[in-house]
Image (cartoon, rainbow, N blue to C red):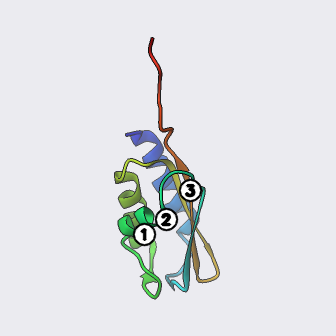
Amino acid sequence: MNYPRLLLSILLLNASMAQAASFRIADIRVNGLQRVSAGSVFGALPLNVGDEADDRRLVESTRSLFKTGFFQDIQLNRDGNVLIINVVERPSVSSIEI
């Protein structure tokens, strides 16, 4: 797992959401999925539509998604009351040795 990138993502999330008030999630959108199913993301995500999202719960969500091992980068953003999750999947083949 790439812990420096995880730490950086969490710090950036905290910095970008530091002044943001909590909000009730009206919808959740996931961008960047190629091989991983949306069901896998929603299954690992501790937030659902209708939940109250605050800084603590957003950081928990980022950690939960990183723990799946499917993603090398995750960013959570907000558009009104819509939670937008931007992901970059890990490569399916990291190296080939002959």
Image point (44%, 63%), residue name: 41
Local secondary structure at mark 3: loop
Number of other residues with Cα within 10 Å of mark 3, as a class: few under 14, some 14 to 19, many 20 or more = some
Q: x, y (%) of residue 98?
A: 45, 11
Q: Are marks 1 and 2 in contact (CB under 8 Å)?
A: yes
What is the three-letter code of the residue carrying label 1? Answer: Phe
Q: Earlier in the sequence, mark 1 or mark 3?
A: 3
Q: Is residue 43 above or below residue 81?
A: above
Image point (44%, 40%), residue name: 4
Local secondary structure at mark 2: helix
Q: CA distance from mark 1 to mark 3?
A: 12 Å
What is the three-letter code of the residue carrying label 2? Answer: Ala
Q: Are marks 2 and 3 in contact (CB under 8 Å)?
A: yes
Residue nearest the observer in this picture, 69 or 57: 69
Query: Residue under circle 1?
Result: 42
Image point (36%, 60%), residue name: 64
Please give the label number shown on residue 22.
none
What is the three-letter code of the residue carrying label 3? Answer: Leu
Q: x, y (%) of residue 76?
A: 54, 64
Local secondary structure at mark 1: helix
Image point (60%, 56%), residue name: 32
Q: Is residue 14 above or below residue 9?
A: below
Q: CA distance from mark 1 to mark 2?
A: 6 Å
Q: Quadrant of the N terminus?
A: top left
Query: Residue under circle 2?
Result: 38
Side of 71 where 20 appears, left or right: right
Side of 65 where 89 appears, left or right: right
